[in-house]
């Protein structure tokens, strides 16, 4: 399989993944936008108006970066886990696996679809947030880097979940019992400096904390976590999960029977 053929196969996967969520935008884009809009109203305006500033910013301004990133996380993950599991369920993933197309292109194609949906929803949520507060960007490089890396990371996570899933129920277990708790405990709605020392230490074991704080630094210029440490952990997770995805495809784990 020459480079041109590989590129054609890769492009086909990417187009399929993007069109998949774009065609049903009422189901894939609108619901998370409505949900995050409620976060702005309930947490930002109703509750936030009763709270004091955090790190020199109003509560609404402080939580906006985390809410935008939460939308990116959830939708990147959801897109890949649902799409790849359907590929398994419909048994057309075998056609890609027996083709001469490299496995790294298969993974990358699905990941780009997840990133596209995550960025799309994240951008719409950012626009919605402008109705509630003024958006200021402290560092465009940090902001876009952390958003893209986070979308890639959770797209890979969704891929792994889909590989191991044996039923439609299995693709909702990780988001419900792992992803949602980690997200809510990842410093989106509070600074870890507000926690007792013990729980601050516990929070440092939550990888989402580093992403949220890097995102907050990109928008506001404040962070509870050293920026270099945050990016190092994010990149380490991305590289590790990508390698694990390739391992799963190469060995046929959860796919070949």
Image: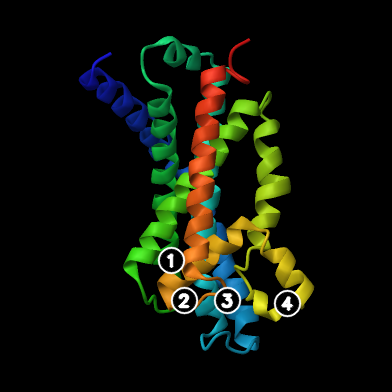
Q: Gap in Å between the C-alphas at discs 4 and 3?
A: 20 Å
Q: Gap in Å between the C-alphas at discs 1 and 2?
A: 8 Å
Marks 2 and 3: CB-CB under 8 Å?
yes
Q: Gap in Å between the C-alphas at discs 2 and 3?
A: 8 Å
How many numbered dots are placed on residues in this image? Answer: 4
Inspect this view and state whether residue 173 appears.
yes
Mark 3: secondary structure:
helix
Residue 149 vs residue 229: left or right?
A: left
- Counting residues from the start of the chain, the first of labels 4 and 1 encountered is 1
- Counting residues from the start of the chain, the first of labels 4 and 3 encountered is 3
Mark 4: secondary structure:
loop
In the rendering, at what x and y percent does residue 232 appear? 49, 57
The quarter in which the C terminus is drawn is top right
Identify the residue position indicated by label 1 in the image. 128
Q: Gap in Å between the C-alphas at discs 4 and 2?
A: 27 Å
Examine the rendered structure and indicate whether residue 235 appears above or below residue 50.
above
- Counting residues from the start of the chain, the first of labels 4 and 2 encountered is 2
Q: Gap in Å between the C-alphas at discs 1 and 3?
A: 13 Å
Q: Residues within 10 Å of mark 1 (few under 14, many from 20)?
A: some
Examine the rendered structure and indicate whether residue 85 appears above or below residue 136.
above
Q: Nearer the viewer, residue 206 or 165?
A: 206
> Residue drawn at (73%, 77%), measured in percent from left and top?
195
Residue 75 vs residue 6: left or right?
A: right
Q: Residues within 10 Å of mark 3 (few under 14, many from 20)?
A: many
The label number, if any, that marks residue 132 in the structure image: 2
Marks 1 and 3: CB-CB under 8 Å?
no
Identify the residue position indicated by label 4 in the image. 195
Marks 1 and 2: CB-CB under 8 Å?
yes
In the rendering, at what x and y percent does residue 123 appear? 39, 58
């Amino acid at each position: 399989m020459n480079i041109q053929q590989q590129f054609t196969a890769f492009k086909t996967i990417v187009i399929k993944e993007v069109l998949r969520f774009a065609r049903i935008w009422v189901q894939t884009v609108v619901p998370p936008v409505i949900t995050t809009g409620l976060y702005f109203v309930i947490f930002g305006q109703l509750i936030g108006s009763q709270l004091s500033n955090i790190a020199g910013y109003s509560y609404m301004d402080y939580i906006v970066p985390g809410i935008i990133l939460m939308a990116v996380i959830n939708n990147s993950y959801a897109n890949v886990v649902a799409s790849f599991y359907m590929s398994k369920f419909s048994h057309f993933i075998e056609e890609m696996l027996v083709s001469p197309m490299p496995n790294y292109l298969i993974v990358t194609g699905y990941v780009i679809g997840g990133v596209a949906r995550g960025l799309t929803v994240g951008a719409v949520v950012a626009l919605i947030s402008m109705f509630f507060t003024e958006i200021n960007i402290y560092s465009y490089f940090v902001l876009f880097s952390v958003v893209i890396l986070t979308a890639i990371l959770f797209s890979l996570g969704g891929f792994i979940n889909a590989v191991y899933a044996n039923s439609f129920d299995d693709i909702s277990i990780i988001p419900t019992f792992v992803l949602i708790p980690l997200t809510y405990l990842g410093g989106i709605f509070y600074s870890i400096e507000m926690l007792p020392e013990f729980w601050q230490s516990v929070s440092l074991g939550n990888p989402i904390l580093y992403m949220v704080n890097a995102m907050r630094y990109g928008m506001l210029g404040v962070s509870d976590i050293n920026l270099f440490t945050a990016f190092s952990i994010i990149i380490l997770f991305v590289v590790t999960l990508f390698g694990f995805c390739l391992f799963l495809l190469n060995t046929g784990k959860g796919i070949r029977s």
